[in-house]
Image (tube, rainbow, N blue to C red):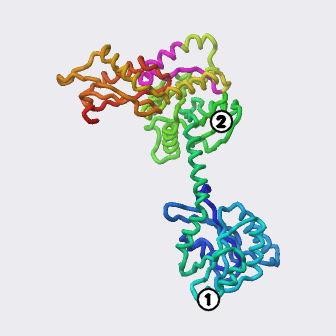
């Protein structure tokens, strides 16, 4: 059941049909129904859906007017404990018999809490008996009774519509809260830590949480799950996503826990804005590292390449290995030449601040917007400096361009024969767009070639 839905409580003395009404509204036989008073002793919860809206419904135990024992007293306490927190209370009474002292005790309780309920007169299948009892029901001082027959379904549809009308303010409030939460979620920078098993992803995750200035929430899982943590560090908010190590698929059996862990890791990449691609500095760059970087690039995410476990190297080894590793990274990760290469130790926190500086820089690039004027100025330069190909004897001409999205930036280029544009020319155009618009450190840049004729 969704905890964010408006909440409706059913209150009333025993044996007035509260559980029958509850079952009728949720369309399930969830609450026990019996003629014996006091059968329901624990609150039962369900969900009511109607006309694209929903609310949570709570069936409470019957309220005895004069509890004779500890069980009846506890039943009263449990039924009334959270009533004031509900968005609406249904006060259910017997629609064909005069109110009793127990009904009036419920009235006194509702008034003491400042609760204005919706008075539901149940068992009103006999209109004649209900009308004969109507004056007595008004003496409760709870407003107009709403006649229903929970057992036969009479008036229940009208009751649901009345409940939804009473919950209109709650629906508006929740919608506003959901929009605020969605906006806050969209604004927070999401960082996924990805890589092979045992490269130090969880060590980095734990080191960050230990060093953070003000942790907001932590959503824990197991070591095979992704783990999210919202933190505030260096005066900025981030959502860190720790992932399971991604092994080569031919070494992972299908339908195993590990195979599902890999799917979750790939899903974490999809959810992230920036991916920290972690490698073991002692192992160098492996084929699996390149495949993981390929997952990130194919997902269109910003990235930072991190060689971890540098605390195991001596200073002379660092002087020798760092330039070599940078050069190897430029060659092996040629498809993400924009990714910054860092060296750090998740265990000691070395390079910790530089990592977040690189993440911030990548995210700024990821969200970058260019003016149409700047883009077309770059296209004019490209037309002059980059020789246009003539596939099948048809010379490619770039007319104009504009940016159509961010995260990552995508530039739409109008030309005469988009289907004939060679891949090497597309790469040259993209390279020069970065040259003239800006390098966009950490972020991919995508281009889309379309026909100008198609826009007419």
Q: Residue at x 64, y 88 (%)?
A: 132
Whole-Å distance between the Cαs marked 2 and 1?
63 Å
Query: Image check: 262 left or right of 348?
Result: left
Give the residue pinned by disc 2. 231
Query: Image check: 232 left or right of 172?
Result: right
Query: Image check: 297 left or right of 392?
Result: right
Q: Is 92 contained in the magenta span?
A: no
Q: In which quarter of the image is the C terminus?
A: top left
Location of residue 307 in the rendering, given as x and y in whole percent from the top left corner? 56, 23
Assess disc 2: are there few (<14), some (14-19) or many (≥20) residues with their C-alpha within 10 Å of its C-alpha.
Answer: many
Location of residue 203 in the rendering, given as x and y in whole percent from the top left corner? 63, 31
- Give the farthest residue toward the left: 393
Q: What stretch is highlighted in magenta?
A: 323-346
Give the residue pinned by disc 1. 129
Q: Is 329 contained in the magenta span?
A: yes
| SS label for mark 1 | helix
Between discs 2 and 1, the one toward the N terminus: 1
| SS label for mark 2 | strand
Can I make out residue 32 in this image? no
Q: Residue at x 52, y 46 (%)?
A: 257
């Amino acid at each position: 059941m969704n905890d964010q839905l408006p909440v409706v409580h059913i209150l009333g003395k025993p044996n007035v049909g509260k559980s029958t009404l509850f079952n009728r509204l949720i369309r399930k036989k969830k609450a026990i129904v019996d003629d014996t008073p006091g059968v329901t002793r624990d609150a039962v919860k369900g969900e009511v859906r109607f006309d694209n809206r929903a609310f949570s419904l709570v069936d409470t135990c019957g309220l005895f007017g004069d509890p004779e024992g500890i069980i009846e007293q506890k039943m009263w306490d449990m039924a009334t404990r959270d009533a004031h927190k509900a968005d609406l209370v249904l006060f259910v009474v017997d629609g064909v018999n005069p109110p009793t002292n127990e009904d009036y005790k419920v009235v006194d309780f509702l008034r003491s809490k400042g609760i204005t309920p919706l008075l539901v007169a149940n068992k009103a299948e006999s209109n004649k008996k209900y009308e004969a009892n109507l004056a007595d029901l008004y003496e409760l001082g709870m407003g107009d009774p709403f006649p229903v027959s929970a057992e036969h379904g009479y008036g229940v549809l009208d009751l649901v519509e009345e409940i939804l009308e009473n919950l209109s303010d709650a629906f508006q409030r929740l919608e506003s809260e959901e929009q605020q939460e969605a906006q806050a979620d969209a604004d927070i920078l999401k960082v996924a830590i990805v890589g092979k098993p045992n490269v130090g992803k969880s060590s980095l995750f734990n080191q960050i949480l230990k060093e953070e200035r003000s942790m907001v929430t932590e959503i824990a899982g197991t070591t095979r799950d992704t783990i999210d943590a919202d933190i505030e560090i260096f005066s900025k908010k981030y959502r860190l996503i720790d992932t399971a190590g991604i092994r080569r698929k031919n070494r992972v059996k299908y339908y195993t826990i590990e195979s599902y862990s890999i799917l979750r890791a790939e899903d974490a990449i999809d959810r992230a804005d920036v991916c920290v691609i972690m490698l073991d500095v002692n192992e160098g760059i492996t084929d699996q590292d390149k495949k993981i970087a390929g997952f990130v690039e194919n997902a269109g995410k910003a990235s930072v390449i991190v060689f971890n476990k540098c605390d195991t190297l001596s200073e002379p080894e660092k002087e020798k290995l760092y330039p070599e590793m940078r050069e190897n990274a430029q060659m092996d990760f040629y498809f993400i030449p924009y990714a910054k290469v860092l060296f750090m130790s998740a265990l000691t926190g070395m390079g910790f601040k530089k990592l977040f500086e690189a993440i911030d820089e990548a995210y700024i690039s990821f969200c970058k917007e260019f003016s149409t004027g700047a883009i077309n100025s770059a296209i004019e330069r490209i037309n002059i400096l980059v020789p246009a190909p003539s596939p099948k004897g048809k010379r490619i001409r770039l007319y104009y361009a504009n940016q159509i999205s961010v995260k990552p930036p995508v530039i739409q280029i109008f030309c005469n024969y988009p289907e004939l544009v060679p891949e090497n020319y597309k790469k040259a155009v993209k390279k020069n767009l970065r040259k003239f618009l800006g390098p966009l450190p950490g972020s991919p840049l995508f281009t889309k070639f379309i026909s100008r004729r198609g826009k007419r």
